[in-house]
Image (cartoon, rainbow, N blue to C red):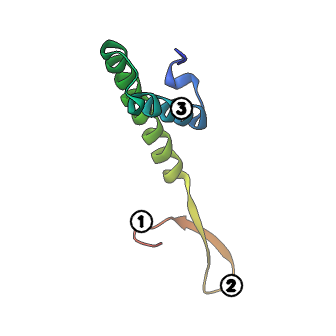
Amino acid sequence: MTTEEPQELSFEEALVQLENIVRELESGRIKLDDAVTAYEKAVTLKKFCEHKLHAAQLKIEKIELSPDGSLQTAPLDKTEE
């Protein structure tokens, strides 16, 4: 497990580290103290990934065709899928 701070990682790198920690914890072959440390790191990585996803979501806009035929952007409505 690397010791990089989440802020130094890309979303993808943080997600890979989180997946590796989960796999390691699920294996059951980790000492209790190491499991607690790994869990704490996983919580930090999870929060980091959630923050990155939320920030990306706020940047997403949809392209609409206005009544006059021109294109415009509008915030993505959370209720639309």
Task: Name the side, left or right, on which 35 lies relative to 17.
Answer: left
Q: CA distance from mark 2 to mark 1?
A: 25 Å
Task: Name the side, left or right, on which 25 lies relative to 8.
Answer: left
Q: CA distance from mark 1 to mark 3?
A: 26 Å
Which residue is under mark 2?
69
- Looking at the picture, which amino acid does disc 3 mark? Ala
Label 2 crowd (10 A; few <14 / some 14-19 / many >=20): few
Task: Name the side, left or right, on which 69 lies relative to 52.
Answer: right
Q: N-terminal of the two: label 3 or label 2? A: 3
Which residue is under mark 1?
78
Label 3 crowd (10 A; few <14 / some 14-19 / many >=20): many
Instruction: Name the residue furthest right.
Output: 70
Q: Position of residue 77 (x, y in %)?
A: 45, 67
Label 1 crowd (10 A; few <14 / some 14-19 / many >=20): few
Tag nearer the camera, 1 or 3: 3
Tag nearer the camera, 3 or 2: 3
Give me the residue at 30% from left, 16% from top. Answer: 32
Instruction: Please tell me in which quadrant of the rendered image residue 28 appears.
Output: top left
